[in-house]
Image: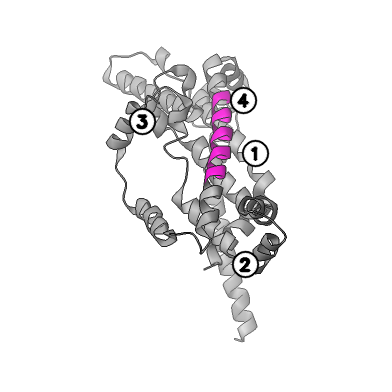
C-alpha cells in the first residue's frame, strides 16, 4: 500500500470520527426541539424522537405570554452585551501594556495573573466580598467579579506580541502615543482575535447562572439561565412529590414546556455564531500557535 492510499484511508477514518462526534452533539438538540414542538400526550406515549408529533406552537406562545420569561430574556441580553463590552475593554487595556518590554515589573504582573488561574479565594470569600461591597441584587454583581478572564488575557497578549515591533515603532516615530498605537494600529489588526474573545465572553455570560444564584434574589434581575434552572428544579420537586404520593399530576410541568424553555434560552446565543464564524477559527488558531 503506497503512502497516498494510506493518507486517504487515514483521512476517511478521521472524517468518520468527526462526523460521528457531530451527530452525537446534534441529536440531543434536535430531540429537545422535537419535544418542544410536540403535544404532551405524544411525548408521554414515547412517540417523539427526532421529529415533532402533533405539531403545536402553544408552548412557545405560553412562554412569550409569560412576562417573567421575556423579562429575563431581555435582561440577559442587556447583561451579556454590557459584560462583553466592559470585559473586552478591560482585557485589551490590560494585555497591551504587558507586551511592552519597557513596562517595569512586567514579569511580576504576568506571574500574578497566571497564579490566579490555579489558585483562587473560593466561593465564600467571593460572596463576602460582593456582599460587603453592597453589590448584591445589582447587575454589577454579575459583571465585576468575572470581568477579566486570565485565559482570554493571555490569548490577546500572545496575539499582540505577534504584531511586528517595527510597525509599532514606525507609528511612534510618526508621533503616535501609546494609546494611538493601540487604537490606530494594534486593534484594527486584531479583528479575528477580538471577535473570538468577544464570543467567548458573551457565551460564558449567557450560559452562567451560578453567580446570579448566589448574588441575586430580586426576580426582575434573574438571567434566563437561572430562570430555566428554577423551572427544572421546581419540576423535579413536583415529580418527586407525585412519586411519594404527596403531590398531584396537575402540578407537573408539561415536558413540551420544559423543552421549549430550553430552546428559548439556547436559540438566541446560537444565532450569534454565524456572524462571528469567519473570525472564530482564525482567531483561535492565531492565539494558540504563537509563542
Local SS, label 2: helix
Q: CA distance from mark 1 to mark 4?
A: 27 Å
Report if the CB atoms under discs 1 and 3 are less than 8 Å apart: no
Q: Tell me which residue sits at (32%, 46%) in the image.
A: 120
Number of marks in picture:
4
Disc assigned to residue 130: 3
Residue numbers of the magenta segment: 74-90
Q: Position of residue 179 (x, y in %)?
A: 62, 50
Mark 4 surroundings within 10 Å by alpha-carbon count, few (fewer than 14), some (14 through 19), many (20 or more)? some
Residue 54 got which mark? 4
- The residue sitting at 51% across, 50% down in the picture is 94
Q: Which residue corresponds to mark 2? A: 165
Which of the marked residues, 2 or 4, is nearer the chain's N terminus?
4
Relative to 205, is 242 above or below?
A: above
Report the magenta stretch's main SS.
helix
The circle drawn on residue 271 is 1
Q: Nearer the viewer, residue 14 or 229?
A: 229
Q: Secondary structure at mark 3?
A: helix
Task: Give percent across and percent down for residue 50.
Answer: 57, 39
Amino acid at each position: 500500500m503506497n503512502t497516498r492510499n494510506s493518507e486517504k484511508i487515514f483521512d476517511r477514518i478521521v472524517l468518520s470520527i468527526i462526523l460521528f462526534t457531530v451527530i452525537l452533539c446534534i441529536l440531543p438538540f434536535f430531540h429537545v426541539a422535537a419535544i418542544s414542538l410536540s403535544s404532551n400526550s405524544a411525548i408521554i406515549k414515547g412517540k417523539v424522537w427526532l421529529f415533532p408529533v402533533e405539531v403545536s406552537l402553544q408552548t412557545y406562545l405560553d412562554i412569550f405570554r409569560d412576562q417573567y420569561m421575556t423579562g429575563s430574556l431581555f435582561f440577559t441580553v442587556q447583561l451579556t452585551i454590557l459584560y462583553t463590552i466592559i470585559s473586552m475593554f478591560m482585557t485589551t487595556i490590560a494585555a497591551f501594556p504587558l507586551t511592552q518590554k519597557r513596562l517595569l515589573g512586567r514579569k511580576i504582573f504576568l506571574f500574578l495573573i497566571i497564579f490566579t488561574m490555579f489558585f483562587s479565594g473560593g466561593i465564600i470569600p467571593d460572596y463576602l466580598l460582593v456582599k460587603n461591597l453592597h453589590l448584591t441584587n445589582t447587575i454589577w454583581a454579575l459583571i465585576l467579579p468575572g470581568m477579566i478572564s486570565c485565559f482570554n488575557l493571555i490569548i490577546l497578549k500572545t496575539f499582540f506580541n505577534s504584531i511586528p515591533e517595527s510597525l509599532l515603532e514606525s507609528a511612534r516615530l510618526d508621533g503616535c502615543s501609546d494609546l494611538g498605537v493601540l487604537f490606530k494600529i494594534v486593534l484594527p489588526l486584531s479583528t479575528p482575535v477580538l471577535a473570538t474573545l468577544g464570543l467567548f465572553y458573551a457565551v460564558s455570560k449567557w450560559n452562567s447562572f451560578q453567580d446570579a444564584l448566589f448574588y441575586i434574589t430580586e426576580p426582575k434581575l434573574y438571567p434566563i439561565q437561572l430562570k430555566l434552572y428554577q423551572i427544572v428544579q421546581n419540576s423535579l420537586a413536583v415529580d418527586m412529590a407525585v412519586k411519594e404520593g404527596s403531590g398531584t399530576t396537575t402540578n407537573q410541568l408539561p415536558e413540551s414546556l420544559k423543552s421549549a424553555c430550553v430552546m428559548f434560552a439556547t436559540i438566541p446565543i446560537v444565532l450569534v455564531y454565524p456572524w462571528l464564524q469567519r473570525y472564530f477559527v482564525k482567531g483561535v488558531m492565531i492565539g494558540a500557535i504563537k509563542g
